[in-house]
Image (tube, coloured by chain):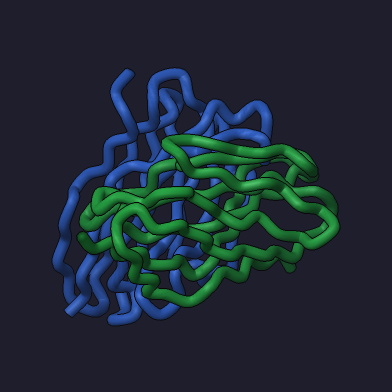
Chain colours: A blue, B green
Amino acid sequence: KAGVTQTPRYLIKTRGQQVTLSCSPISGHRSVSWYQQTPGQGLQFLFEYFSETQRNKGNFPGRFSGRQFSNSRSEMNVSTLELGDSALYLCASSPGLAGGLETQYFGPGTRLLVL
Amino acid sequence: GDSVTQMEGPVTLSEEAFLTINCTYTATGYPSLFWYVQYPGEGLQLLLKATKADDKGSNKGFEATYRKETTSFHLEKGSVQVSDSAVYFCALSPRAGGGNKLTFGTGTQLKVEL
């Protein structure tokens, strides 16, 4: 099976712009989660989508949003970018039916740089 | 809320040395516990996991045992190789409430030298 894919791999934006990141899960997986990785804050959970519905949410401002399509592909959007949004954004997928018992499989990430 | 504490790095070892990376957690109920590894420029890969007390996860010579009494999940390997150099993350996922939500430790960088 193909792994989790994320596009684009690298992005450079300026403050105030918005950005959309895409994630394609492993075939058959219905849960997609997003994480932000920064040197200062480490790995932090953003949100999880399952069957097109947000099932869990982390403690991020409303500028961070996401959605999931009927084919389980997911997008994450960040509006009004700030310098502190520079990070590696990781997407993970899992079947979605066994909750915390499941292994999440991670993509390679999208590295976002905000200037 | 849930939290994971792991030892600060970097940890520098000689090849064939014994490795221990400590991990303790705070969580409501009985979470599932994971070790993920991140190689430079890559995403996270699952190394091993345990879903209930006294379970031992193992993979590629790495082992960790879910200790409920000490709320710990320490990672061990008997003989490290240069190829094990990476950043290791301990994580937990709550079993109650459904869904996936990993809480990670800060990561421990391991450098193995010849």
The answer to whether residue A32 is visible is no
Give the quadrant of the C terminus of chain A. Answer: bottom left
**Horizontal side, residue A11 vs residue A30: left or right:** left
As drawn, B64 above or below B27:
above
Give the quadrant of the N terminus of chain A. Answer: top left
As drawn, A98 above or below A100:
above
Write down the quadrant of residue A110 in the picture: bottom left
As drawn, B75 above or below B12:
above
The image shows residue B77 at horizontal and vertical percentages of: 48, 49
**Horizontal side, residue B84 vs residue B19: left or right:** left
Give the residue at x 49% y 44%.
B62
Give the residue at x 60% y 38%.
B57
Q: Nearer the viewer, residue B4 or A8?
A: B4
Residue at the farthest front position: B16
Q: How many marks?
A: 0
As drawn, A62 above or below B37:
below
The image shows residue B79 at horizontal and vertical percentages of: 40, 49
Give the residue at x 67% y 65%.
B24
Q: Nearer the viewer, residue A66 or A85?
A: A85
The image shows residue B37 at horizontal and vertical percentages of: 40, 51
Give the residue at x 42% y 75%.
B9
Write down the quadrant of residue A11 in the picture: bottom left
The answer to whether residue B86 is visible is yes
The image shows residue A21 at horizontal and vertical percentages of: 29, 50
